[in-house]
Image (tube, helix red, strand yellow):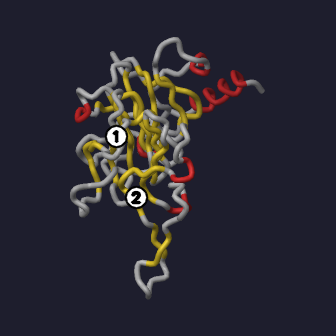
Amino acid sequence: MNAQEMYRKMLAQQSQSSDAPPFKVSAPALSIPDDTTLVVFGGTNWDNLGKGKEAHTKSAPNLMGPCRLVLPGVKVAFVATSSCSSHCIALSASGAAYAWGRNQCGQLGLGDTLTRAGPTEVTALQGTPLSAAATGKHHTLWLGAEGDLFASGSSKEGCVGPSADKRREMEATPVAVPGLAAGAAYVAAGGAHNLVIDREGTLWAFGSSECGVLGNGTDGQYNKSDSSIKLAYATEAAPLKVPKLAGRKM
């Protein structure tokens, strides 16, 4: 069975349900679109596909085949999501940001913790054209076209950079991440850590050090107290150079 036949079979199965989603779906969605329309498919939990207001109900089942998600008047130039996140980011050709999905830690950068079932413009970043973004489990990195780096979401594990108020557990509005004098060129996010390559080719890391993901030679494992058997992991909120790769251009 080739891809087109498999897709037609999935469409037939989907059409048997009266609760099928109201997307206009056709076989050509399997090919590369001529325009910049987003093509989405997969699970619809937490509205991470921009399904609409009924994303948690049976009226919006999982999308078994590609569906077009149209942002009227927006030419999409970049998209970001990951297997560990339940939210999505889209950037327009002009550098505007749109976010949707789960938002319990303010990772969408919209100034609140309300889940968004469809693409919503991140107004806090208006005036700062963006070139890329990266999504972690509960945070987002936003890369400005001029090398500025911003972050939003949970600050518990240092993923949004150093906070002036250490008691603050989240940043629902994007905040600047200091420490990269050369400016950021590329960004990547894991579940609770970040990697950044600056404009000079140096690799930086910050966030949770669990399992040694920061590349600093330790997993940061420790006991919170002598009587505790539960292990905790040190965090690095400020970007630090990865020691073993110091002097190498990425």
Q: Position of residue 149 (x, y in %)?
A: 34, 39
Q: Give the residue drawn at x 50%, y 39%.
A: 61
Label 1: how many residues lie within 10 Å, few (<14), some (14-19) or many (20+)? few
* Other-residue count near label 2 (Cα within 10 Å), few / some / many at <14 / 14–19 / ≥20: many
Residue beneath disc 2: 236
In the rendered image, residue 108, in percent from the top left (x then y), is placed at 33, 42
Q: Is residue 35 above or below residue 77?
A: above
**Which element is circle 1 on?**
loop
Between residues 134 and 162, which one lies in front from this camera angle?
162
The answer to whether residue 178 is above or below residue 93 is below
Q: Quadrant of the N terminus?
A: top right
Instruction: Find numbered disc 2 in the image and state the secondary structure of the residue it sits on.
Output: strand
Q: Is residue 93 left or right of residue 246?
A: left
Q: Nearer the viewer, residue 71 or 5?
A: 71
- In this rendering, the label closer to the viewer, 2 or 1: 1
Picture layout, residue 164 above or below residue 224: above
Among the two numbered marks 2 and 1 on one chain, the one whose residue lies closer to the N terminus: 1
Q: Would residue 7 be found to the left or right of residue 228 on screen?
A: right
Say which amino acid is labelled 2.
Answer: Glu
**Marking on residue 181:** 1
Q: Residue 162: x and y, percent? A: 30, 54
Indicate left or right for 8 with 217 as reference: right
Residue plotted at (34% across, 50% down): 160
Q: Looking at numbered disc 1 in the image, what kind of residue is underneath it?
A: Ala
Circle on res. 33: none
Indicate the quadrant containing the C terminus: top left, top right, bottom left or bottom right. Answer: top right
Q: Nearer the viewer, residue 82 or 192?
A: 192
